[in-house]
Image (cartoon, rainbow, N blue to C red):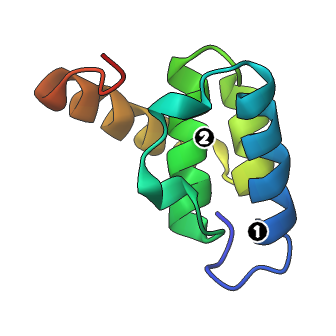
Amino acid sequence: MLSPDHPDIASRHQQLRASIVAQGVEGWLSDIADEPSRESLIYLCKFAFFTGILTKSQISELLGADRAELKGLVRSWYDDHRRKGCGTC
């Protein structure tokens, strides 16, 4: 997983945010997505995954996550989704 001070976080954040904007779903983003950070990049990955913009493989590449990290991350997203609902409705 990327470290919080990884030099590519800002560019990856900008790239992913641009993909979300291109799909026209940026209106559902929370304020956490405004400033580049590891946490906001993870949030954008979660959002993009649930809106069908990114695959797990792409998320792994963006976050530098190995298979076990990715599995735990995606599992936590589904658990969160079950608890809170989709958040985009």
Residue under the image location 50 percent in, 20 percent down? 50
User: Which element is circle 1 on?
Assistant: helix
User: Which element is circle 2 on?
Assistant: helix
Q: Is residue 16 above or below residue 27?
A: below
Residue ID for mark 1? 9
Q: Is residue 84 above or below residue 59?
A: above
Compared across the picture, whether 22 is left or right of 72 comes to right
* Label 1, residues with CA under 10 Å away: few <14, some 14-19, many ≥20: many
Compared across the picture, whether 80 is left or right of 64 comes to left
Residue under the image location 87 percent in, 63 percent down? 11
- Closer to the camera in the image, 31 or 43: 31
The numbered dot on residue 45 is 2
Going by the numbered disc 2, the residue's amino acid type is: Cys
- Closer to the camera in the image, 37 or 5: 37
Query: Which residue is situated farthest in the bottom direction here?
Result: 5
Question: Which quadrant: the C terminus?
Answer: top left
- The percent position of residue 52, horizontal first and vertical second, equals 63, 14
- The percent position of residue 19, horizontal first and vertical second, equals 80, 32
Q: Is residue 27 above or below residue 40?
A: above
